[in-house]
Image (tube, helix red, strand yellow):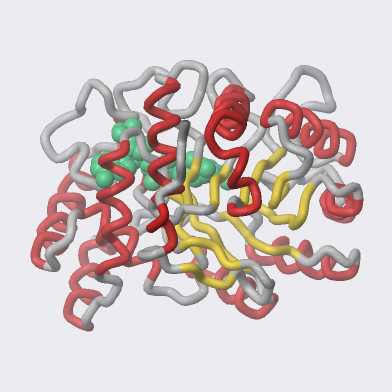
Amino acid sequence: MYQAAESRYDDMTYNRCGRSGVKLPAVSLGLWHNFGGVDAFETARAIALRAFDLGITHVDLANNYGPPPGSAEENFGKILRHDLAAYRDELIISSKAGYTMWDGPYGDWGSRKYLLSSLDQSLARMGLDYVDIFYSHRPDPETPLEETMSALASAVQQGKALYVGISNYPADLARQACQLLRGLGTPCLIHQPRYSMFDRWVEGGLLDVLDEEGVGCITFSPLAQGLLTDRYLNGIPKDSRVAKPHGFLSENQLDEPTLTKIRQLNQIAQERGQTLAQMALAWILKDPRVTTVLIGASSVSQLEQNLGCLENRHFNEAELSNLTAILAG
Ligand SMILES: NC(=O)c1ccc[n+]([C@@H]2O[C@H](COP(=O)([O-])OP(=O)(O)OC[C@H]3O[C@@H](n4cnc5c(N)ncnc54)[C@H](OP(=O)(O)O)[C@@H]3O)[C@@H](O)[C@H]2O)c1
């Protein structure tokens, strides 16, 4: 019988999410990979429980996480029932709809029809009455933004979500979405964009918009799916995301210029007394507009190592200019 560690709130930092009442752990756990039907359930369970023991109160899911799609929610539902049921009120659980989930015109994108039926399915898979955050997973160029945002607001009015968020919205659409949601009485809690040393698009306006709108920011793939770690310094390990047939990271993303950058970054991390993964996470968390970094992990030891990022989040001017030069190279 799982009993949560009494020390679970001792070392984690909790950051306020935008101008809301909610605080999120500086590091959150995502279940996109490693929690599907193709993965070892006991490893997934060990990662989720260790995360909770270390103060990670936020778990991020989506309807389509697996593979197969839906299996990550089913597996997390099992963990909830068997281990975490007593701790439901200590958890912020999110789900999303926006990518292809089922056949036909109603299982994708951003219609009211898709979002609300998908949310019902997610709740059933996880065995929950409500999720804490429900997201529009991506903007839909063919559905009026008003329809997608009003579907999110309905999820809250129906008691099936406590808060709403948006993911992958560019700055201008994010601003419109935030304004619509505020008008509907369900302010946008959070935006979930990709952000890492290797993908800095959010610095071109989105972070400013979120700051002005009072919306939190949870950055996904902060380790560039594992590139910003020591995982690929000496080739492609058999159990890595690149090697797995269902992994979303492909070998051609590991070209020589990228590997050169990874080696140079690794050198700076070592000089700072950190692993590359820890430095990559600390580098994102140095920006106060970022509420939390949303990591993935395929083992408990990766998770534990990554949390070490909280021990040194300060960068001096020389380090910052070295990093900028490497990343621009
Ligand atoms: N909203 C969206 O559209 C969207 C899109 C993508 C992701 N997300 C969310 O963001 C979460 C995180 O995404 P992500 O998994 O791509 O994040 P990530 O943290 O950039 O990458 C995680 C992967 O990096 C490797 N890794 C992690 N720590 C390591 C360490 N210390 N040493 C060596 N390798 C390490 C592992 O891969 P190995 O398998 O090689 O060990 C791990 O699975 C997802 O679970 C999901 O919740 C959202």
**Which quadrant of the picture is home to ligand 1?**
top left
Which residue appears at 24% of the width and 47% of the height? 229
Left or right, 149 with respect to 80, comes to: right
Which residue appears at 45% of the width and 57% of the height? 293
Which residue appears at 81% of the width and 19% of the height? 104
Tell me residue 204's x, y (percent): 51, 69
- The image quarter in which residue 319 lies: bottom left
In the displayed structure, 327 sits above or below 75; it is below
- The image quarter in which residue 39 lies: top left
Which residue appears at 24% of the width and 38% of the height? 255
Left or right, 329 with respect to 294, comes to: left
In the displayed structure, 281 sits above or below 1; it is below
Left or right, 76 with respect to 316, comes to: right
Inspect this view and state whether residue 25 appears: yes
Inspect this view and state whether residue 168 appears: no
Q: Nearer the viewer, residue 327 or 281?
A: 281
Q: Residue furthest bottom?
A: 317
In the displayed structure, 23 sits above or below 196; it is below
Tell me residue 234's x, y (percent): 11, 35
Circle count:
0
Q: Nearer the viewer, residue 258 or 281?
A: 281
Placement of the C terminus among the 4 image quadrants: bottom left
Q: Nearer the viewer, residue 253 or 237?
A: 237
